[in-house]
Image: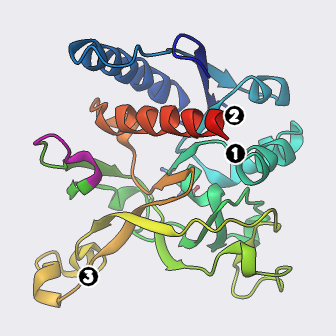
């Protein structure tokens, strides 16, 4: 990639909140451009944002967002439209930058609980096990202030107002797929993504929601009182990033801007290899 080339970012547009992501990406790209002009640093490349509905669209993309929605529907439609294998190839073989929000995080997990009965296929790419609908049903949706240290650069606080809607949680970090053999089949409704090229990148925990699980039940207990670290709601492994919440529903483009920066870094790395 050269400094003035265009980077195409796709948003999977089979179901769910894809339009909201495109809107915030446009916003974030403008911010990024302004900031880099301020610093008179490297000229920013142009970004192009497209909706991805078939393998031809995906083929044009340097990076991809898988939005929130209903992970079962997204995987069924992806399978019917011949996108499931190209998506696995994009994430796990080409290892291009991908970000999944909520249902997108579920699809990027190597394992998901409560999925077998719905016949859900996963894409995989993140060595984690997620639990779907961990925080309860639609009526138990909530908003919370999260502390996201990766947003805290240049004097920022890292506080981010987050929306959780039938959100999953990352309940376990798994051993890297580079050391895992064929999946052994599912237990207790857990499904497993097919194995692909392994990665040596470790899973980094980028965000935790303090005490929410317990607090949801009694509504007064705090994480500190429980001595808890909190539930894992944001992770990154190599180029694969996942959040259990929905930054695209807040109007706050900081995570989108940060992620576009990560995409630029990945593109620069790929170029020097
Ligand atoms: N609970 C949904 C699922 O299992 C995800 C919800 C969301 O993306 N807001 O797919």
Task: Locate the N terminus by quadrant.
Answer: top right
Mark 2 closeness class: few <14, some 14–19, many ≥20 residues within 10 Å: many
Q: Is residue 68 left or right of residue 43?
A: right
Nearer to me, 67 or 156:
156
Residue labelled 1 has its Cβ within 8 Å of some atom of ligand 1: yes
Q: Which residue is mark 1?
A: 74
Query: Residue, x 20% and y 44% (percent of image)?
Result: 153
Mark 3 in CB contact with mark 2 (< 8 angstroms): no
Label 1 near label 2: C-beta < 8 Å?
Answer: yes
**Ligand 1 under 8 Å from disc 2 Cβ:** no
* Location of residue 244 (image quadrant): bottom left
Mark 3 element type? helix
Q: Nearer the viewer, residue 169 or 59?
A: 59
Q: Which residues are magenta?
A: 150-155
Left or right, residue 5 beside residue 83: left
Residue 136 spot, x, y in % from top left = 41, 68
Q: In this view of the protein, can residue 148 be seen by the observer? A: no
Quadrant of res 254:
top left
Which residue is label 3 attached to?
A: 214
Quarter containing the C terminus: top right
Is residue 149 visible in the rendered structure shown here? yes
Residue 81 shown left or right of residue 25 in the figure: right
Tell me which secondary structure the magenta stretch mostly adopts: loop
Nearer the N terminus, badge 3 or badge 2? Answer: 2
Label 2 vs 1, first from the N-terminus = 2
| Residue linked to disc 2 | 14
């Amino acid at each position: 990639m050269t400094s003035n080339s265009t980077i195409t970012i796709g948003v999977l547009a089979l179901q769910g909140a894809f339009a909201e992501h495109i809107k915030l990406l446009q916003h974030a790209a403008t911010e990024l451009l302004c900031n880099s002009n301020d610093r008179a640093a490297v000229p920013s490349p142009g970004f192009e944002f497209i909706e991805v509905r078939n393998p031809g669209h995906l083929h044009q993309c340097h990076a991809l967002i898988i939005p929130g929605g209903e992970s079962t529907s997204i995987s069924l439609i992806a399978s019917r439209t011949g996108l499931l294998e190209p998506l696995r190839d994009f994430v796990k073989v080409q290892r291009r930058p991908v970000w999944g929000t909520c249902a997108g995080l579920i699809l990027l997990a190597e394992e998901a609980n409560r999925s077998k009965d719905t016949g859900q296929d996963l894409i995989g790419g993140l060595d984690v096990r997620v639990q779907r609908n961990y925080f309860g049903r639609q009526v138990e949706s909530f908003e919370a202030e999260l502390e996201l240290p990766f947003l805290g650069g240049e004097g920022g606080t890292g506080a981010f107002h987050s929306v959780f809607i039938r959100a999953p949680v990352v309940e376990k970090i798994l051993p890297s797929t580079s050391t895992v053999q064929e999946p052994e089949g599912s237990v207790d409704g857990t499904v497993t993504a097919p194995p692909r090229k392994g990665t040596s990148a470790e899973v980094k925990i980028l965000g935790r929601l303090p005490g929410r699980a317990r607090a949801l039940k009694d509504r007064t207990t705090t994480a500190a009182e429980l001595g808890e670290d909190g539930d894992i709601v944001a992770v990154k492994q190599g180029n694969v990033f996942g959040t259990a919440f929905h930054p695209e529903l807040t109007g706050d483009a900081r995570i989108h801007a940060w992620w576009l920066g990560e995409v630029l870094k990945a593109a620069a790395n790929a170029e020097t290899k």
